[in-house]
Amino acid sequence: MIEVRELTLRRRKEVLLDGVSFKWKNGLVYGILGDADSGKDSLLRAMAGIFSPDGGQIKINGFDLEREPMQARACIGFLPKEAPLPAELTVAEHLHFVAEARGLSYERAVRSVNRALESVGLEEYRHALCASLSGYRAACAGLAQTLIGKQDILLLEEPTVGIDPTRASAFRALLAEIGEGRTLILSTSSVEEIRKLCDHVLLLSDGRVELDLPVEEIGSELGARFRAGRTEEERPHRQRRHETVLGRDGEYELIDTDDEKEGRA
């Protein structure tokens, strides 16, 4: 169970999260949807224990993240956006280092690393240098590190960013497979990713919850609410404007309207 109550987060004078609350059961794939200014990544990092909130409460499997951080974090695997890999280590060496950092014995580490490599399809790349991996395989290696240990809740920050679009669908399929028997929570700006991968969606706008409901219930409401957003006049001058539109194939798509105006779309 993941429970967030009245979560607030500020950085300097900016409000990143403003009274965010939700309660999710385990065993599903959850998507936190929003544009770059929505607070989606800040929420994920607060749940991972990287950002300390200014108010509110986060409970992971019944453990209060502030009062019982070790127990709460032991339930979590976190993959930051475009996670850097140590260039000088092989994939297996990197995963063994992660296992050691998490306190696994040598025997448990060997078993956990082997399972993780098998789960993401990198067995034949165990001795490859991390620096030599393609974008897709680097993402798989990053995902493998979240599987070291017994974490049953995986937090994935925009997991398909940096992956060639031709491989993104394969990585989503891998995430769906990894998610069986686990809880996956991912942040994204892609409505398509939500519809294809997630069971439940949380729509954030300006750090506040706009929608919190099963994906099969979103219908056209998600597009309308996400499309409404803030107007261009309400945004700082140099911030880009994104909208969700209904494409020809019937899927909602996130577009950069600034790029369209400037002929770069």
Image (cartoon, rainbow, N blue to C red):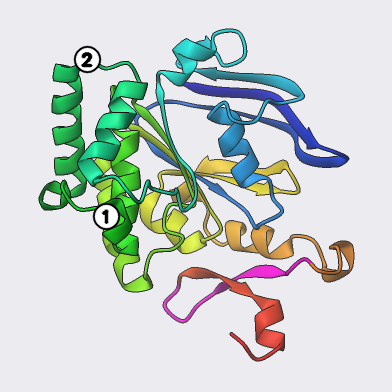
User: In the image, is residue 246 part of the stretch drawn in magenta?
Assistant: yes
Q: Secondary structure at mark 1?
A: helix
The percent position of residue 3, horizontal first and vertical second, equals 56, 22
**Front in this rendered view, residue 119 or 95:** 95
* Residue 44 seen in the current view: yes
| 91 vs 39, nearest the viewer | 91
Q: Secondary structure at mark 2?
A: loop
Task: Give the image quarter of residue 9.
Answer: top right
Q: Which quadrant is the N terminus positioned in? A: top left
Q: Residue at x 57, y 26 (%)?
A: 49
Residue 41, x across and y down, in percent: 60, 45
Question: Looking at the image, is mark 1 or mark 2 earlier in the sequence?
Answer: 2
Q: Residue at x 64, y 74 (%)?
A: 256
Out of 230 and 164, give the one closest to the viewer: 164
Magenta stretch contains residue 76: no
Q: Which residue is mark 2?
A: 105
Q: Amino acid at mark 2?
A: Ser
Q: In the image, which residues are magenta?
A: 239-250
Expressed as whole percent of the image width and height from the top left, the position of residue 212 reads 58, 40
Asked if residue 180 can be seen in this view, the reply is no
Badge 2 crowding class, 10 Å Cα cut-off, few under 14, some 14 to 19, many 20 or more, is few
Residue drawn at point x = 70 percent, y = 88 percent: 262
Q: Which amino acid type corresponds to the residue marked 1 in the rendered image?
A: Ala
